[in-house]
Image (tube, helix red, strand yellow):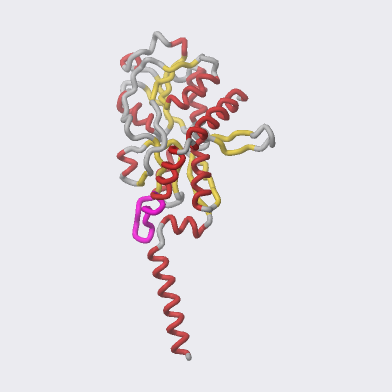
């Protein structure tokens, strides 16, 4: 009898070990019942906090957060958003502190070395924002030599600033809203940012800011993707990426993503107007 029990226990242990060995990132998320998503929640219309006028409660808004919630629903798990500095998101994904990061993250070669990405879900044009009063002053890259240009720390724009505008003085900050304020107040002369975000702040500052004629050169092919940890033995990511990519395909094909964009733009506009 003791031998039978011992054999049963050994089989249970072996099954458990096999299950653990075969577990992947998707299995772990489902087992935990939570999808941990990293984002820098201050980047309208991608992700931001918005006060619902009907309830008076603060909510997560923006199409990145809507994608995150949609993925959690697709997986049948709860969504947990980890709000942190943009510059630390890739590091957190790489360290498996996050299941993924959804924060308007451009798919760049150096990032692909340490994390994997979904297919692109959104593209944007990188531009230079200046004060309207400086429209005639800043029209070329050469005009920006010696000027102070702001960009978000750890962003695609930081790389553009350091390469294309090497003769300018950089100001790197974590906060997009603070960069817009610095430009409006004249602390910086230009601001490198995606056009989607820039238009929100140009409207907020009543056309005191504008998109300049200064050309901004960058890789237009990448777009923004969802970053996930690299595959490792027992932590493969193929199944997770398949779910994410299928979800992206679905919402872009059935019009859901267009609706997300429309709602996000409207909420971001109302948020900035309130400020």
Q: Quadrant of residue 21?
A: bottom left
Give the answer, above or below, for where 203 lies relative to 25. above
Farthest residue toward the front?
254
Residue nearest the viewer, comparing 161 with 106: 106
Q: Is residue 85 magenta?
A: no
Give the answer, above or below, for where 222 lies relative to 72. above
Q: Determine the residue positioned at 34% across, 46% down.
A: 114
Side of 180 relative to 111 (left or right): right
Side of 259 relative to 160 (left or right): right
Farthest residue toward the top?
136
Residue 1 picture location, percent across and down: 48, 91
Residue nearest the viewer, comparing 223 with 206: 223
Q: Determine the residue positioned at 34% across, 35% down.
A: 222
Give the answer, above or below, for where 268 lies relative to 60. above
Residue 269 picture location, percent across and down: 56, 25
Q: Determine the residue positioned at 69% across, 34% down.
A: 54
Number of disc labels: 0
Residue nearest the viewer, comparing 196 with 172: 196
Q: Determine the residue positioned at 51% across, 14% down.
A: 208
Farthest residue toward the bottom?
1
Residue nearest the viewer, comparing 7 with 154: 7
Residue 210 picture location, percent across and down: 46, 16
Q: Is residue 230 magenta?
A: yes
Quarter of the figure with the C terminus:
top right
Q: Over which residues does the magenta segment extend?
A: 229-241
Magenta stretch: dominant secondary structure: loop
Residue 167 picture location, percent across and down: 31, 21
Farthest residue toward the right?
55
């Amino acid at each position: 009898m003791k031998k039978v029990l011992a054999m049963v226990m050994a089989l249970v242990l072996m099954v458990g070990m096999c299950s653990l060995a075969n577990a992947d990132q998707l299995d772990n998320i489902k087992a935990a019942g939570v999808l941990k998503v990293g984002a820098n929640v201050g980047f309208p219309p991608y992700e931001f906090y918005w006060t619902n006028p009907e309830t008076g409660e603060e909510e997560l808004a923006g199409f990145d957060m809507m994608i995150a919630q949609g993925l959690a629903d697709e997986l049948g798990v709860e969504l947990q958003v980890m709000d942190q500095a943009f510059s630390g998101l890739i590091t957190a994904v790489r360290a498996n502190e996050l299941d993924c990061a959804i924060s308007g993250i451009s798919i760049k070669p150096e990032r692909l070395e340490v994390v994997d990405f979904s297919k692109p879900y959104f593209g944007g044009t990188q531009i230079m924002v200046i004060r309207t009063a400086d429209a005639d002053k800043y029209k070329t890259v050469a005009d920006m030599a010696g000027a102070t240009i702001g960009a978000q720390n750890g962003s695609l724009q930081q790389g553009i600033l350091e390469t294309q505008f090497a003769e300018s003085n950089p100001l790197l900050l974590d906060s997009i809203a603070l960069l817009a304020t610095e430009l409006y107040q004249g602390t910086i002369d230009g601001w490198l940012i995606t056009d989607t975000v820039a238009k929100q702040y140009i409207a907020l500052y009543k056309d005191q800011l504008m998109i300049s004629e200064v050309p901004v050169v960058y890789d237009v092919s990448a777009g923004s993707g969802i970053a996930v940890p690299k595959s490792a033995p027992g932590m493969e990511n193929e199944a997770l990426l398949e779910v994410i990519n299928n979800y992206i395909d679905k919402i872009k094909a059935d019009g859901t993503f267009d609706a997300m964009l429309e709602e996000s733009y409207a909420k971001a506009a109302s948020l900035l107007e309130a400020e």
